[in-house]
Amino acid sequence: MDKANRPGGDLSPSSPIAPWLHAAAVAVAIVGAFLGSGALGGTPIQDAAGGWLSADGTVLAPGAGAFSIWSVIYAGLVLHAVIQLLPAWRGSTLQRRLRPWAAASALLNAAWIWVVQWSQLLLSVVVIAVLLAVLARTFILILRTPTTGRTERLVVGITFGLYLGWVSVATVANMSALLASRGARAPEGTTTVLAAAVLGVAAAIGITLAAKTGGRLAPAAALAWGLAWIAMGRLDGGLQSVPIAWAAGAAAALVVLAALVFRLREARTPRHQVAGRRGGAAR
């Protein structure tokens, strides 16, 4: 039986209704996230779950100013959801592949907020880990799939690049909050060493992302932003630590430097070699 004649119609990513379903999912997710964040009353995220996710919850928590990046990410998600409805984008190969993953990322983000509001930190780590995996898959699709032009490439690249970079930092902070909430305490004198090691891993992730993406700036910028705000939080917050602040600042600088180096290297590579390495995907 033809898909279009099946009961319920064709709900595949290439069906005519798919762009509208994606836009609806993003709208529901963003409204749910807004309500769950406590913006209209209730408990703000930083005060939920015992306050373990606040700027002073752990030594790896970003300072309060770091979370302003969500305004940019949400704006990008809304812009993408609207523009992919346009005829020029509606049937593009990239949008067909991207829709289910983009919608899933928005829904998972809203789910994370509500899980935190229910004080389920363990479940929140599971949700954010799945979100990180979905975003990684999303960005791989962006890199490997041809686009209709520069505008589409910029919108999806910047939006989901920032999203991926920030959630990478948020995952580290979330796991740190879970361990702290469970009473995990490092032996005296080793907290700084362990925190520096984790920040080193975060920097390694940023360098790997730069290498695999040809120095894409959006993931690096968001990751470095989060690391820099961890440094700020350790300098003027309730959990001050100059060594951890220096380690976080150095990690942020390494991530930015790696992105610039690989970006420059990619710019010097002939275009046919770039296309060959990425299966012909346009940059």
Image (cartoon, helix red, strand yellow):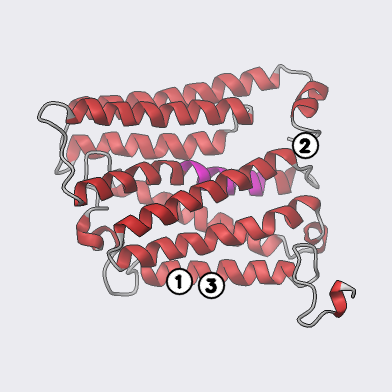
Rendering coords of residue 214 (x, y %): 64, 27
Q: Which mark is residue 189?
A: none
Rendering coords of residue 252 (x, y %): 39, 29
* Image quarter of the N terminus: bottom right
The residue identified by callout 2 is 281
117 is within the stretch colored magenta: no
Q: Residue furthest left?
A: 188
Rendering coords of residue 151 (x, y %): 72, 47
The residue identified by callout 1 is 32
Q: Which residues are magenta?
A: 154-165
State how far apart marks 3 and 2 are (Cα).
31 Å
Please give the name of the residue rendered at 27% of the width and 39% of the height, measured from the top-left corner. 60
Q: Residue furthest front?
A: 1
Instruction: Please indicate whether residue 227 sits to the left or right of residue 184 in the image.
Output: right
Specify the amino acid type for callout 2: Ala
Q: Secondary structure at mark 1?
A: helix
Q: Secondary structure at mark 3?
A: helix
Q: Crowding near pointer 1: few (<14 within 10 Å), some, many (20+)? A: some
Q: Is residue 101 or residue 217 the one in the foreground?
A: 101
Quarter assignment of residue 40: bottom left
State how far apart marks 2 and 1 are (Cα).
35 Å
Please give the name of the residue rendered at 67% of the width and 71% of the height, measured from the top-left corner. 21
Q: Which mark is residue 28?
A: 3
- Residue 135 position (above or below residue 226): below
Q: Is residue 252 or residue 132 the one in the foreground?
A: 132
Rendering coords of residue 134 (x, y %): 56, 50
Instruction: Please indicate whether residue 75 sits to the left or right of residue 64 in the image.
Output: right
* Image quarter of the C terminus: top right
Q: Are marks 1 and 3 in contact (CB under 8 Å)?
A: yes
Specify the amino acid type for callout 3: Val
Please give the name of the residue rendered at 69% of the width and 44% of the height, measured from the top-left corner. 141
Q: Residue furthest right?
A: 2
